[in-house]
Image (cartoon, helix red, strand yellow):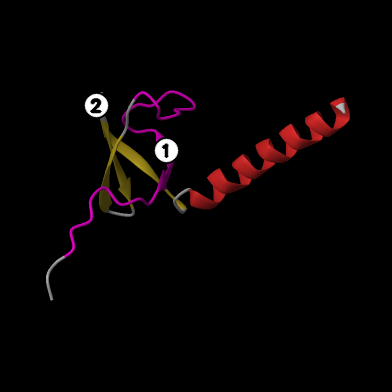
Amino acid sequence: MKRVSVLVVACAVLLILVASVSYAGKTYQFTGKVLEVKDNVIVVDKNGEKFEMTKDAGTKVKGDLKVGAKVTVKYESRAAEIEVKAK
């Protein structure tokens, strides 16, 4: 009986993990040189085009983030707001 309970819990955890991955937004990335770093914003030059990305306490930063550093920024596409217009 104990084995069945463990198996049921394991299956439930697996289903939750699969569902959370399938509902996540698509991930993109770009690489460039850091032009500016603020508390909540990073500006990166990617081949002459400036990309301004917001960051917060949940943003993982690996290494010393400073102006002039070469970085790869990974980000998700997600809708912040959707407004439906009348036909």
Horizontal side of 82 relative to 30 (left or right) equals: left
Left or right, 39 with reference to 28 = left
The residue to which callout 2 is attached is 38
Extreme front residue here?
1
Badge number at residue 70: 1
In the displayed structure, would residue 67 be above or below residue 82? above
Q: Secondary structure at mark 1?
A: strand
Residue drawn at (48%, 25%), measured in percent from left and top? 63
Q: Nearer the viewer, residue 1 or 50?
A: 1
Asked if 55 appears above or below 26 in the picture, the reply is above
Quadrant that contains the C terminus: bottom left
Verify CB contact (< 8 Å) between mark 2 and mark 1.
no
Q: CA distance from mark 2 to mark 1?
A: 16 Å
Q: Residues within 10 Å of mark 2 (few under 14, many from 20)?
A: few
Q: Where is residue 15 drawn, in percent x and y? A: 65, 44
Instruction: Report the amino acid beneath label 2.
Output: Lys
- Looking at the rendered structure, the kind of residue marked 1 is Lys
The answer to if 27 sits in the magenta stretch is: no
Residue 62 forms part of the magenta stretch? yes
The residue depicted at 14 percent of the width and 67 percent of the height is 85
Span shown in magenta: 57-84
For the residue labelled by badge 2, is the local secondary structure a helix, a strand or a loop?
loop
Q: Nearer the viewer, residue 46 or 15?
A: 15
- Residue 45 picture location, percent across and down: 30, 46
Q: Who's the residue at 42% across and 38% down the image?
A: 70
Residue at 40%, 30% in the rendered image: 59
Quadrant of the frame with the N terminus: top right
The rendered magenta stretch, by its main secondary structure, is classed as loop
Q: Position of residue 4 (x, y in %)?
A: 84, 33
